[in-house]
Amino acid sequence: LISEIISKFRNLIEYFPDETILKNARVPEALASIDGEDAVENSVASCNPSRIVASTQLLWQLYEESKKCEDLEEKASIKRRKLENGCAALEKGNTSTCCSIEVIVEDIKKLNQSFCSLFQWVDGSLVEAMRKGDLFLLDEMSLAEDAVLERLNSVLENSRTIVLAEKGDDGRGDESHIVKANENFLIFATMNPGGDFGKRELSPALRSRFTEIWVPSTFHLDDIELVLTSNLMDGQCHIDCDEIKRVILAYVHWFNTSVCNDSSGPYAGLSLSLRDVITWARFVLRVCGGMATEIDQWEALCHGAALMHLDGLGLGTGLSKDDAESAKKRSITYMIDLIPVHQQEKCHASFKGNKIDTILTRDRFGIRPFFIPFGPYSKITDSFNFQAPTSCLNLLRVLRAMQLSKPVLLEGSPGVGKTSLISALAKAAGYNLVRINLSEQTDIADLMGSDLPFPDDSDDLESASSSSFKWCDGVLLRAIKKGDWVLLDELNLASQSVLEGLNSCLDHRASVFIPELGKTFECPDSFRIFAAQNPLGQGGGRKGLPKSFLNRFTKVYIESLNDNDLNAILESSYPDIPSRIRSAMISFNNDVHCSV
């Protein structure tokens, strides 16, 4: 706005050849000598709009008084030859000159009024798309409130218009508050079927305004094979693509038809999607071609199956632990049968997750064969015991999940150490962890940011801005800018609208768009999202999460600590306590747990 005001003021000065008038109007010397666009840009920081407006008003008054001067026409002809834009000649009594100056004066006043206003109308993305004739996509349309959807009715009808009643009347008497869509404007919408957690159906009245297209799930093996071939060919590692495809396609077909075929059974909603298959293929390419510690394709296939869905089978859906373990055993048995006989013993060990000591190197942290690079912060030794058998197994699963850039979702009973595990891993690997506790009251503005009032401490009234609102980054946006790790704790307590607002951060886009700023922020490579939650039946207020949201995560089930783990932790933390007392403490804890 200041730049526009200066440009208008420069045009106004062009109409006044008499230096006496400029001096009497108290025009700042820096503004009076502006010449060229670069000079305008360089003057923005040092100029104050209120002084420019005051000079503009004086110039208008002095012009009215001096336009009858006898020598004005002579000076105007000299000034006219210097103008690049061929402005109208300043002749005595020339009405066109008077009108031009008056228009510029009014424009400067309006720009200054906008600059001084606390709030200003700014077109949203829909209105901008309607004006420019862009394509507009409403993602997850069924999650919007009814009032928002009904507001779109006039846009979806033949008139293709919208009345911006919120904009108000600017006093010009025109119809700027009525927006008619450009002929090239098209609107698309997507939604998941109702019936899943957090999903609902649209009203028949609204659906009748759309042309509906049903997009079926990709379960046909020929379609999956095409996508799988395309992804495997992108890698530079030496693997037998035909064998990899054979195992993946056979396993996906078996799991979807043999385990998930009963629509009334507990596994009805657990069928593998195309996104799962792509995740599996990319993991195989990642670990076979990009790691210093070699791992063959058969081990990579087994680790990939565990990462893709076996580590978190049924997580977030309310599936009982017994049903999950039963399906997991069947799946591992079938998977091993697909592997060549001479490789089966080694691959079976991949699913067991035998205890291996933590490996620390100069530039990596991890458990063989899965490592992550050290972060930019100093490494801190935490009291968390990675050497406990179950803790080591949980860490191995998390490190395996981190081989891909997908976010990681951890689920386990309260107190098993989900948050502590990620916090200790961040400290050991040299990353800053930002923990965000979610609840039903959490709003998307809390995560991304909003305009907040701020005090103006400036003592210079001329240089102080009249605005008292300033954009403040939310905790998630700050973490994205810094490339920190983020832990979304109690994920299944947040509202569905907040969770769906994170979709662009969780999928392949890896970015977030802030409408208030009109900017898109890309997630850097060091940025990682972790989420933790308790099972659906443990704790009040928890709700299931839809499959379309869950499959954006790599899911990891955090095993509860057993007696051996507790004994190892106590021995490491309190070595002076006798073994007999440690055993008694653990037994007492188990008795209390069973009784409650």
Image (tube, helix red, strand yellow):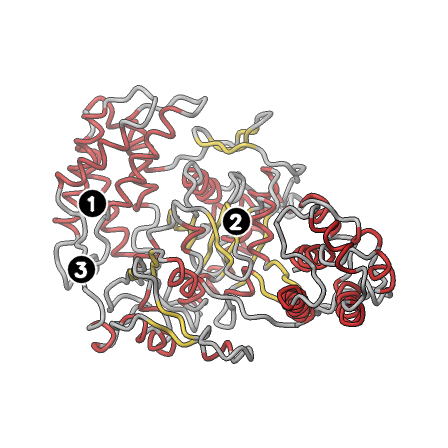
Density class for disc 2 (Cα within 10 Å; few <14, some 14-19, many ≥20) is: some
Q: Residue at x 85, y 62 (%)?
A: 26
Going by the numbered disc 1, the residue's amino acid type is Arg
Q: Residue at x 18, y 48 (%)?
A: 218
Q: Nearer the viewer, residue 389 or 230?
A: 230
The quadrant in which the N terminus is found is bottom right
Q: Position of residue 45 (x, y in %)?
A: 75, 52
Where 365 sits versus 577, above or below?
above
Q: Residue at x 21, y 51 (%)?
A: 271
Going by the numbered disc 3, the residue's amino acid type is Ile
Cα distance, mark 1 to mark 3?
A: 37 Å
Cα distance, mark 2 to mark 3?
A: 32 Å
Going by the numbered disc 2, the residue's amino acid type is Phe
Direction from residue 522 to residue 228 in the image, left or right: left
Do labels 1 and 3 touch, CB within 8 Å? no
Q: Position of residue 413 (x, y in %)?
A: 43, 59
Where 171 sits versus 323, above or below?
below
Do labels 2 and 3 touch, CB within 8 Å? no
- Residue tagged 1: 330
- Residue tagged 3: 213
- Residue tagged 2: 521
Decide which of tag 1 and tag 3 comes sooner along the chain.
Answer: 3
Decide which of tag 2 and tag 1 comes sooner along the chain.
Answer: 1
